[in-house]
Amino acid sequence: MAKGKKKQPKRYLFEEVLSFLKHNDGKSFNYKQLGAAMEIDNESDRFALLETLEELKHQGFVIETEIGKYQAKESKTYQTGTIDFTSSGTAYVIISAEQPDVFIPQYKTKDALHGDLVKVNIFNNYGRGKAEGEVVEVIKRAKTRFVGTIQINPKFAFVVSDFSKIHVDFFVPLADINGAKNGQKVVVELTEWRRGDKNPIAKVIEVLGNAGEHETEIHAIMAEFGLPMVFTPEVEAAAKKLATNITPEEIAKRRDFRGITTFTIDPVDAKDFDDALSLQKLENGNWEVGVHIADVTHYLKPHTILDDEAVSRATSVYLVDRCVPMLPEVLSNFACSLRPHEEKYCFSAVFELDDNAQIQNQWFGKTVIYSDHRFAYEEVQTIIETGEGPYKDEIFTLDRLAKILRAERTSKGSIFFDKAEVKFQLDDKGAPTGVYFKTQKDAHKLIEDFMLLANRKVAEFLGKKPKDDNQKGGARKEKNDKNSDAVVYRIHDVPKDEKLMELNNFVERFGYSVAVGNKTKTAQSINKLLQDVKNKKEQSMIELLAVRSMPKAIYTTKNAGHYGLGFEYYTHFTSPIRRYPDVMVHRLLEAKLNHTHYLKADELELLCKHSSEMEKLASDAERASIKYKQVEYLEDKIGQEFEGVISGVTEWGIFVEIIENKCEGRVSMRDMKDDSYVFDEDNYRVVGRKTGRIYTLGDKVTIKVRRADLVKKQLDFEFVSGIPSAKEPEIRNPKRYKKRR
């Protein structure tokens, strides 16, 4: 027994010393420096430290850089990446798209928090591309401010994060609670995470209000995602100083469209109108369609406080009850909004189309327009369906041309994901009173097709090289500047064959198929699949898996085409009020038309990366606000039964989406008392060991609402007994079963 006790400090020292040296990779220390850093203050422990260093050197973990000085041995197993926590406290470090994620056990995440850039030591690889490692250093914090609920005790306080992937509570000294009351929502700033401490130390920097109240929870979502509540006084002041009047001098520099029929088509509750369409018949019988986009860059100049703010925000964010705009209201709702019966500056893409919607000529440049009418989508849809209404002839012509454009891109491989958008009806206090779904009809598609045309043709104009580089005068003579042709693209890469094969293997069980290997044929087969599953039991499941098989669209200067749309060149030109990449594209287009340059490729690429990241953040924030409203909507419906569809299956539980309102909740595995269930990963289902009952992705089920937790934004359901799952095919790979934990 005594012998065992004697070895314990040495094993502890072994791990501590190695961890310290790895944390200070590249630096050398003698045993006295190490002892001081590790607070070793007696002779016997110092001797044990020396012994440990020699043993680490003997085993090849450290090297002696000079007599008595040691450092961690460099290893190719050290890599950096972004850490992504699960709600259970384990994590994965994402190194790159080409390299498998590294699994990090809960006890080896060190002081990392979700989203941090970390250094990992990869020490296990179990085959099939799976690796395991440990965090040795946090290189950069993703954020230092967090939102949560404060729990105040007599001598201290803790803040429990709202976000399930933040796996630790924040210790807050009572002197730093900033007047918060027990149970309130607060924002904390991480101040310190001392070595060996279980919890980080933080201070309350803002009290948001009482948990569960509408304004508190929406502000909590904004704070969690780092969204600004308001513009700073300096930004507002700069916006108010802008000269927004239309002048004869500026009109003289632009192509004048004020005498041509022009109108906007937007949602009924829209406040910013950043695009308009004009139409006129030419003497040769062709149609001139103008796609007119608010000329934001006329007012938004580079390197100003307004532009810096727009860069930082990068996108407008549309939460369930409000918009967090990229630009101040002076610009977004007034100067740059193409409001009816007002003259406005635009940047336009103008196309001469024949009756078959084939482009005969195109023109890009600055314009001035006058919007004759402001349409809502519903009004245009009524005109298309009934044949009656203002500007019906123009609407009919645009609709006919748009449908030809749509058919053409369908034939070239454009994929159509037609998913309904969930919207809530809110009362004057923001409480949800009902749910409705926005679906795309011809009016929406009319606008979409002309916006896609403009985006595609602007991208081609900016990025496509001339066919004859030797033509007289040299069409693209440049100054040997590799950055001179830099363009901001919106790309959507080709899905990986293995992802498509997984999709195909699954849909084959239902009698469908997906072509693999040819881009166009694959796209056409996915479109056919999406049409074939309409109104079928498996529709939700297959639509979800089809979306998951696709890579994410991003902004970049490196063109890879847009697979989902079937375009070789594509960018975003049509929404500069709400997207900063569109602002960059406007400046690039103006620079090309004026034979000047805007920014170098590396500068543009940094802005593209930031814009892609902010786009994801905006999407996550929007989903969080919708989830909150879903929970609030079902809060008074505890015990009620609903028909639903299984939307997700994991080893922890089964997710169900209610059909009538699209609210999604989870049936926890531990609450399924009728049997012991195992998770069949390959077949997206769980199977009862005794009963053989099967719950599969896409199954229609009946659930009862068990709990609606507003603080955690979590819905818990339970299956109604006696509702059997639909019979499924035999399990293909029973060895892949996973027991519930």
Image (cartoon, grey):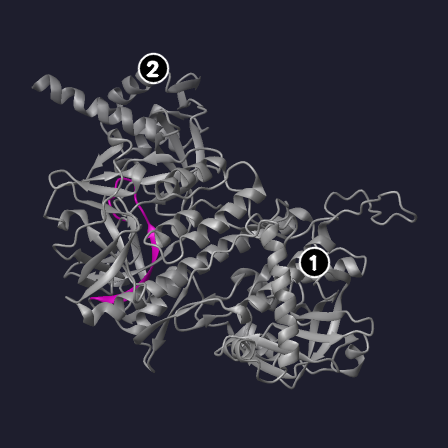
- Describe residue 195's horizontal placement relative to residue 641 as left or right: right
701 shown above or below 389: above
Chain-order first, disc 1 or disc 2: 2
Regarding residue 243, the answer to whether it shows in the image is no
User: Which numbered dot is residue 458?
Assistant: 1
Looking at the picture, how far across and down is residue 664, in whole percent?
A: 29, 59
Q: Is residue 190 magenta?
A: yes
Q: Which residue was labeled with disc 2?
A: 59
Residue type at the position of mark 2: Gln
Q: Write the residue at 32% across / 36% down.
A: 104
Crowding at dot 2, Cα within 10 Å, few <14 / some 14-19 / many 20+, comes out as few
Residue type marked 1: Val
> How many numbered marks are there?
2
The percent position of residue 646, horizontal first and vertical second, equals 28, 53
Res 204 quadrant in image: bottom left
Which corner quadrant of the image does residue 520 belong to? Answer: top right
Residue 368 tag number: none
Residue 475 or residue 401, whichever sits in front: 401
- Magenta stretch containing residue 694, yes or no? no
In the rendered view, does 64 fall on the left or right side of 169? right
Q: Is residue 449 above or below residue 670?
A: below
Q: Secondary structure at mark 1?
A: helix
Task: Provide residue 706's location: percent of width, then percent of height.
Answer: 16, 61
Q: Is residue 36 visible?
A: yes
Q: Is residue 471 left or right of residue 569?
A: right
> In the depicted view, which residue is nearer to us: 527 or 313?
527
Label 1: few (<14), some or many (≥20) within 10 Å?
Answer: many
Stretch of the chain drawn in magenta? 183-199
Circle 2 SS class = loop
Specify whether 741 is left or right of 163.
Answer: left
